[in-house]
Image: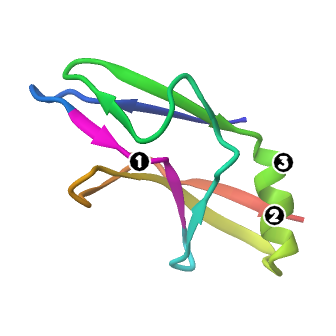
Amino acid sequence: MLFFKISNPGNRDVIVNLPQLRLSNGYNVFLPDMQSNVNFPCKVTDGSCIYAWYPIHALQADLIKQGMKGSIEIQGIIEDQTNVTYKAKRKLTLDLV
């Protein structure tokens, strides 16, 4: 399972859109079937967090269907309503076999 925790450590509310993945080849992947404890777009109040998740095997299958193979790095990203992009602190490597 690919798990997202979106937190707002700031001191004002922010509205965020559906999380995405940035691939090492520069493409962004939208996951419209992503599950979450909220509906997107969503307000994240200061000091709070929200969660979203997606089956990693489904992501791997989709990327393979698109013709990708080998290993690829992915990084979670999310945009707020002012089009500011926030990136996950860590990147993950997916093996597409």
Q: Residues within 10 Å of mark 1 (few under 14, many from 20)?
A: some
Q: Which residue is mark 1?
A: 17
- Dot 2: element: helix
- Residue 83 shown left or right of residue 38 in the figure: left
Q: Which mark is residue 57?
A: 3
Q: Answer with left or right where residue 6 lies relative to residue 14.
A: right
Indicate the amino acid at tag 2. Asp
Residue found 18% across the figure and 30% down from its top: 13
Residue at 31%, 31% (x, y): give it.
Answer: 43
Dot 2, crowdedness within 10 Å: few (<14), some or many (≥20)?
few
The N terminus lies in which quarter of the figure? top right
The amino acid on which the numbered mark 1 sits, given as a three-letter code, is: Asn
Q: Secondary structure at mark 1?
A: loop
Disc 3 element: helix
The residues tagged by marks 3 and 2 sit, at their Cα atoms, a distance apart of: 9 Å
Q: Quadrant of residue 9?
A: top left
Is the magenta region chiefly helix, strand or loop? strand
Residue at left offset 51%, top offset 32%: 39
Q: Which mark is residue 2?
A: none
Q: Is residue 25 above or below residue 97?
A: below
Q: Is residue 64 above or below residue 86?
A: below
Lower position in the chain sequence, tag 3 or tag 2: 3
Q: Which residue is mark 2?
A: 62
Say which label, 2 or 1, has the lower sequence index. Answer: 1
Q: Amino acid at mark 3?
A: His
- From the viewer's perspective, tell me whether residue 52 is left or right of residue 89: right
